[in-house]
Amino acid sequence: MELEPYLFFSDGNCETALSAYATIFGGKIDGLTRYKDMPADQGPQIAPGTEGYVMHARFSADGFKFMASDGSPGQEYKDGPISLSISVGSKAEADRIFAALSDGGKVDMGMQPTFWGSYFGMLTDKFGIDWMLSAPV
């Protein structure tokens, strides 16, 4: 059994977000299908101007993967009950990733040593995804 998160983005931001994550994490977009690639008689009706939105994509980096979509055009996905948690091997790597993800986003807790023995921080990136990062102290 395997759990794989599925992220939904609003306003056609999926591909931009995945490209940013590929740079930040050294990952890659393994597959990407747009709504315009869908047969006309299958799937949701799409609004003009949303044909290029991402219907489905897969992302992978060293140690994690997830799926993503712009969702059904016109539906908003904001402040869902999920945070992605990334554990890295060093404070320096945590600081690098945290800085990149927080650029244009909102820091909830800056990277810092915690009482439970981790170097930890939380943020919401500019695409509305909540992240938690941790590294050994």
Image (cartoon, rainbow, N blue to C red):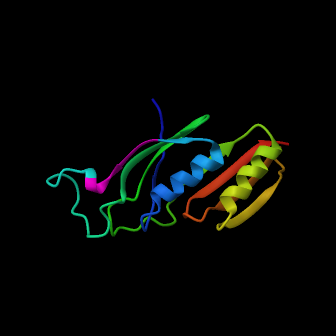
The quadrant the N terminus occupies is top left
- The quarter holding residue 107 reads bottom right
Membership of 94 in magenta stretch: no
- The quarter holding residue 122 reads bottom right
- Per the picture, the main secondary structure of the magenta-coloured stretch is strand
Q: Give how far across and how far down residue 67 sits, in percent.
A: 45, 45
Residue 83 in view in this figure: no
**Image point 61% across, 35% down: which residue?**
62
**Image point 48% across, 45% down: which residue?**
5
Total numbered labels placed on residues in the image: 0
Task: Tell me the magenta residue range.
Answer: 30-36
Residue 45 in view in this figure: yes
Q: Is residue 106 left or right of residue 1?
A: right
**Image point 47% across, 40% down: which residue?**
4
* Residue in front for this viewpoint, 98 or 39: 39
Membership of 33 in magenta stretch: yes
The quadrant the C terminus occupies is top right
Picture layout, residue 81 above or below residue 74: above
Q: Give how far across and how far down residue 134 sits, in percent.
A: 74, 46
Q: Is residue 94 left or right of residue 76?
A: right
* Residue in front for this viewpoint, 87 or 27: 27
